[in-house]
Image: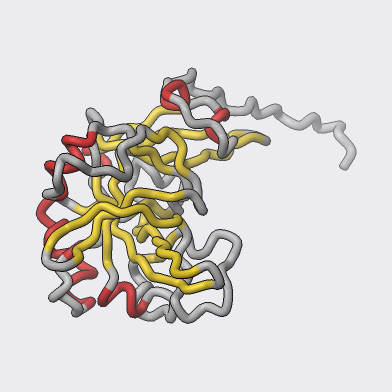
C-alpha cells in the first residue's frame, strides 16, 4: 500500500525529469506529508504535450453514483486491467505522480513505527498512476490512484506492497496515449531495486494528517525490539 507521500524536490528537477516547462504553477509547494483525499501533482499527456495538474488522491470511477470517502487510493498493478474501476483508465488515462519519498509503518510490540523510504541519495521519482473524472453536482472532479507492486526486500518488512516506481526509460512509454495494450504496459511495473533505495525511522508525528514540515523527515533512533520474557513454569493460564 502507499498512503502517504512527499514531494520536496526543486521544481527544476521535476521539469527536467518529465520534460515540462520550468513554470510549473501547481505542485510548487514543498509537501512533507501528503495523505489521501488531498490534492497531488500529476503528470499526464494532453494535446500532444505533457502537463502538470492537481488531482484529488483517491480515484472515483466516472460511472460511480457518488464518491467514496477517499476513493481508490491504490490499485494493484497485477489486477488493474481486470477491475471495472481501473480497466479503462489503465488503457486510456495513465499518468505519473511525482514524489521523492513515501512512508510505511512497522509493527513493533503494541505500536507502529513509521519509516521514510526514498531513492538512495534522494531525488524525484515517478509513481505509475491512473486517473479518471467523476462529475458531481458541483461539476467534474479529477481523481487519481497510485499503482502498487509486490514490495522489494527493503520495504517488505513493513508492508507487502510498494508504489510502482517507473524507471526513467519507462516514463515515456507509460505516458504514451497511443499505447493501449496491457501486454506492453504491465512489464513496466516492477518493484524498484532495493539496493537503489534507503529508509530510516521517523517521528510518529507523521501519523497526524495535519503535520507537514521538514522535521518529519529527520531520523529518529531505531526502535528497540520488545524484550521476550521466558514464561515461568508455575504461571497459570
Which image quarter holds the C terminus? top right
Which image quarter holds the N terminus? bottom left
The residue shown at (53%, 72%) is 136
Q: Which residue reaches farthest right? A: 236
The residue shown at (15%, 40%) is 22
Q: Which residue reaches farthest front? A: 138
Residue 191 visible to the viewer: no
Where residue 211 sits, quadrant-wise, is top right
Q: In the figure, 9 relative to 138: above or below?
A: above
The residue shown at (22%, 36%) is 11
Residue 175 visible to the viewer: yes
Q: Which residue reaches farthest top? A: 221
Q: In the figure, 37 relative to 115: above or below?
A: below
Q: In the figure, 98 relative to 44: above or below?
A: above
Between 25 and 40, the one lying in front of the other is 25
Give how far across and how far down residue 170 sits, in percent.
14, 58
Give how far across and how far down residue 195 sits, in percent.
23, 38
Where residue 145 sits, quadrant-wise, is bottom left
Q: In the figure, 170 relative to 155: above or below?
A: below
The residue shown at (42%, 26%) is 217
**Number of callouts:** 0
Give how far across and how far down residue 120 sits, in percent.
24, 32
Give how far across and how far down residue 68 sits, in percent.
58, 67
The type of colouring in the image is: secondary structure
Between 45 and 162, the one lying in front of the other is 45
Q: Report the side of 208 relative to 147 (left or right).
A: right
Between 56 and 87, the one lying in front of the other is 56
Between 159 and 215, the one lying in front of the other is 215
Amino acid at each position: 500500500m502507499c498512503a502517504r507521500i512527499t514531494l520536496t524536490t526543486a521544481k527544476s528537477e521535476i521539469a527536467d525529469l518529465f520534460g515540462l516547462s520550468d513554470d510549473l504553477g501547481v505542485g510548487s509547494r514543498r509537501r512533507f506529508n501528503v495523505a489521501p483525499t488531498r490534492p497531488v501533482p500529476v503528470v499526464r499527456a494532453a494535446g500532444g504535450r505533457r502537463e502538470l495538474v492537481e488531482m484529488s488522491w483517491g480515484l472515483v470511477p466516472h460511472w460511480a453514483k457518488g464518491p467514496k470517502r477517499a476513493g481508490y487510493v491504490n490499485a494493484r498493478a497485477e489486477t488493474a486491467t481486470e477491475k471495472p474501476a481501473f480497466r479503462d483508465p489503465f488503457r486510456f488515462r495513465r499518468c505519473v505522480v511525482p514524489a521523492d519519498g513515501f512512508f510505511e509503518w512497522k509493527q513493533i510490540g503494541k505500536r507502529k513505527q513509521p519509516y521514510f523510504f526514498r531513492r538512495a541519495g534522494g531525488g524525484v521519482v515517478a509513481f505509475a498512476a491512473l486517473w479518471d473524472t467523476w462529475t458531481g453536482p458541483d461539476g467534474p472532479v479529477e481523481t487519481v490512484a497510485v499503482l502498487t507492486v509486490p514490495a522489494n526486500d527493503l520495504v517488505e518488512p513493513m508492508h507487502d506492497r510498494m508504489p510502482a516506481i517507473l524507471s526513467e526509460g519507462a516514463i515515456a512509454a507509460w505516458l504514451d496515449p497511443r499505447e493501449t495494450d496491457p501486454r506492453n504496459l504491465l512489464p513496466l511495473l516492477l518493484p524498484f531495486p532495493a539496493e537503489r533505495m534507503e529508509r530510516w525511522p521517523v517521528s510518529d508525528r507523521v501519523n497526524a494528517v495535519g503535520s507537514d514540515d521538514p522535521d518529519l523527515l529527520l531520523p529518529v533512533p531505531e526502535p528497540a525490539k520488545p524484550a521476550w520474557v521466558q514464561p515461568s513454569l508455575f504461571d497459570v493460564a
